[in-house]
Image (cartoon, rainbow, N blue to C red):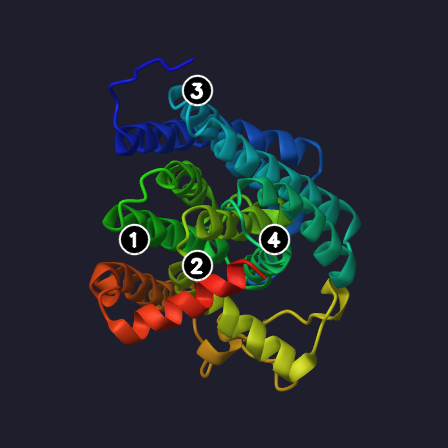
Amino acid sequence: MIILPQLPLYAIAIICGLLSFFVTRLVMPKMIKKLEEADIVGKDIHKSWKPVVAEMGGFGILFGFTLGMFSGIYMHEILAFPLVVVLVVILLVGIIGIIDDLLALSSRGKFFFLFLAGLPLIWAAPPNVGLLYLITIPIALSIGSNLTNMLAGLNGIESGLGVISMASLTIACIILGKYDVTIISMSMLGALIAFLYFNRYPAKIFPGDTGTLIIGAAIICIAFIGRVKLIAFIVLMPNIIDAALKFYSAGVMNRQQQKPTQLNDEGKLVRPEQGFKSLIRLVLRRPIAEKDAVKIIWAIGIVFGVIGIMVALVMPGMLENQTLMNFLQIKEMFYHI
């Protein structure tokens, strides 16, 4: 099964990332054309001329990621099982995204289906862990997927934050010597970079829930399989802040209840006088161009990505601290409840 047994894990991860990048880059133009012909399109409401843009572009991300992962599975027999489990989970989440794009699932329905999609990840959990830890895995996957789905709506914001998160996780995992999970992060990173070229301002295609849900799902898979949950939590902080603002101001909302950000006469984004709070609306303290608002959100993502990398750098030294070691022993007890 192994083609090049002499290849180290980091080389396999690079090959997976490059393959997913080139595959996504090649299929996207044709996919955009086919989606437009099939009338799977939507209006870009954050522009004064309201252009019609292809939707459900997450197909391209999913396609590139799948082929990248297949190459990793083929080149490393020992890691085949956990990689197959991750691929199954991401594909299931992608299917839920497709259903949500077409049928607009309720918030509770989406959470439940994502919980079911996360169940296979239990088979990749560490040995001898308890029931509470196992149940936490699909719950975390459902929450993480929803987080990356909520901070959305502007050209390039979702895919750009996804690139930042995956790049940060990849660097952190390399620092910690967790080269196995870099196959997952590099496969998603390559696909997202290629997709961002078409999704950045002015967008030619939107990711849809098909694309946004799988970004969060990939982060959670990396967090649990690579045991880098703290770093994953840090890189997800922009999404967590956004979700906290929305829940605090409006509670759980369905898509139909969400009011879009408005445009002024100059074509700049302005936040409505009333309505829920969000990270985007926090940025819009004054009228600002869409692409500038996205860059600010990206900058926030980069800050937390750098913090995640710094945590990875100091983590080996922290393990020598006796107080922290005592805390980690308590944490280990949680795994066996």
Q: How many residues crowd mark 3 within 10 Å: few (<14), some (14–19), many (20+)? A: some
Q: Which mark is residue 134?
A: 4
Q: Earlier in the sequence, mark 3 or mark 2?
A: 3
- Residue 312 visible in rendering: yes
Residue carrying label 1: 172
Earlier sequence position, callout 2 versus callout 4: 4
Question: Splitting the image into 4 quarters, where does residue 10 fall?
Answer: top left
Question: Disc 3 residue type?
Answer: Tyr
Which labelled disc corresponds to residue 229?
2
Q: CA distance from mark 1 to mark 3?
A: 25 Å
Residue 332: image x %, image y %? 45, 62
Of badges 2 and 4, nearer the viewer stands: 4
x and y, in percent, of residue 244 in the image: 56, 76
Q: N-terminal of the two: label 1 or label 3?
A: 3
Q: Disc 4 versus disc 3: distance between alpha carbons? A: 28 Å
Are circles 2 and 1 on residues that touch, CB within 8 Å?
A: no
Q: Which residue is mark 3?
A: 74
Depth-wise, is mark 1 or mark 4 nearer the camera?
Answer: 4
Disc 2/disc 4 C-alpha distance (Å): 14 Å
Q: Nearer the viewer, residue 103 or 69?
A: 69
Left or right side of 2 for 258: right
Q: SS at mark 1?
A: helix
Residue at figure coordinates x 79%, y 48% from the top left:
103
Asked whether disc 4 touches disc 3, contact meaning CB atoms under 8 Å apart, the reply is no
